[in-house]
Amino acid sequence: MENNFDLPEKFEEFSEARRNGFIKAKELKERGGRLAGIFCTYTPVEIFDAANVIPVSLCGMSDETIPAAEVNLPKNLCPLIKSSYGFAVSDKCPYTYFSDIIVGETTCDGKKKMYEMLGELKDTYILHLPQGVDRPYALSMWKSEIILLKEKLEKKFNIKITEDDLRKACEDRNREREIKIRLFELNKSTPPKSFYMNLHKVVDSLNFSFNRSEDLKKIEEVINKIEDDFNNGIRPVKESAKRIMITGCPISGVLDKTVGEIEKNGGCVVIMDNCNGIKSARNMIDENANDIYEAIAKRYMQVACAVMTPNDNRMNQIRELVSEYKVDGVVDVVLQSCHPFDVEKYKVSKLCKELNVPYLPIETDYSKTDVGQLSTRFEAFLEML
Ligand code: BJ8
């Protein structure tokens, strides 16, 4: 039976955030504002906030621009990389168009080489991430990179970023993380308080926010409304719905055929541990630390991504979330040709076995060709739980 996960009318504006953001980006530029395109959860957004530069997410979410990308990029590359480059090279992404600067990181090989090509189209700056977090020099290296980014923005925009600006930005972003976590925690209850498709639309709207404090207020209103409804006996999700956790690659480009199909087939995604989900909200910055740059570096080094080796943070995160969200089954979504997450499936499957929680790995791309096949696999997985 199909679940109804339409957003209540009041919240429909969250789905529109990306589209409305285009107009806001244009207006911002007309007012002389500054915009930066970013790609990754390792990006220390506090530096942009302190520089009064609005960071927007540039990750490609559709296969529409992949043919344009494949003119210059190999076909057997992850769709997220091809789509992102395709939007830039075909001038189809207003955010890229209006960005004063693009900032990427040395994460996976495909992305870091693609950034070099983006550099032909826009001023592109690359932060160099350490390859792992267990080396004694990793923290000081990453702190130096964060300071270099600050200096790059100061030079580019002819501004001075003060420590006070930075501390204020850290406080604000910590508050934002707390609100996002409150939103995710709605689904700790039994039954969960919302389908994940709805929660995703709300949280994703922040990737295109031009007035964070106002947008966060709206999100708090949504959280309160969902809680009030639940307390008044409204149950959008059945108690019998199997509780699914999604892990793996970012899935904005395959959301409908993963989360959507799971929820249409009678499951409920209670949490996503990936970069579209709770990964970007976990771990706070120590706002009162003497060395605020080091505090920022420490927080971002805890991001649990398969590009790090070892990546124990991800395993610990999965272990905690499976227990906290009472997960019945884990779905590991790997985008085609994503070697870091594909290889790491081995460790995730072993961990799930140890935790005694059924595990379903899937590999997909941005096309629509496998929607039916995925739906059948989710149906069978949910039945088996
Ligand atoms: S912190 S997950 S946003 S790197 S682009 S690794 S899917 S082959 S996106 Fe990521 Fe930052 Fe990590 Fe998150 Fe694979 Fe594709 Fe590479 Fe990707």
Image (cartoon, grey):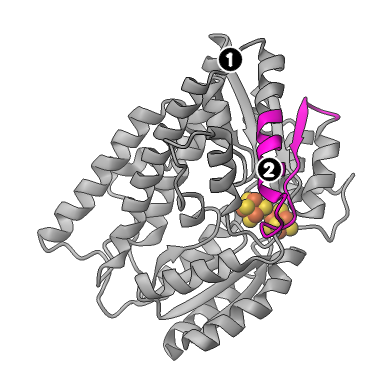
Q: Is residue 81 magenta?
A: no
Place of residue 256 in the rendered image (x, y in percent of width and height, measured from the top left) = 52, 60
**SS for callout 2:** helix
Residue at 57%, 27% (x, y): give it.
48
Place of residue 45 in the rendered image (x, y in percent of width and height, measured from the top left) = 55, 35
Residue at 36%, 56% (x, y): give it.
184
**Residue identifier under label 1:** 29
Residue at 25%, 72% (x, y): give it.
190
The stretch of residues the image draws in magenta is 120-148
- 293 or 183, which is in the foreground? 293
Q: Earlier in the sequence, mark 2 or mark 1?
A: 1
Amino acid type shown at disc 2: Ser
Residue 176 makes an appearance in the image: yes
Q: Is residue 147 magenta?
A: yes
Q: Quadrant of residue 60?
A: top right
Residue 100 makes an appearance in the image: no
The correct choice, above or below, for 251 with respect to 114 in the image is: below
Q: Is residue 258 left or right of residue 217?
A: right
The correct choice, above or below, for 63 with respect to 295 in the image is: below
Mark 2 touches mark 1? (CB < 8 Å) = no
Q: Which mark is residue 140?
A: 2
Amino acid type shown at disc 1: Lys
- 267 or 104, which is in the foreground? 104
Q: Residues within 10 Å of mark 2 (few under 14, many from 20)?
A: some
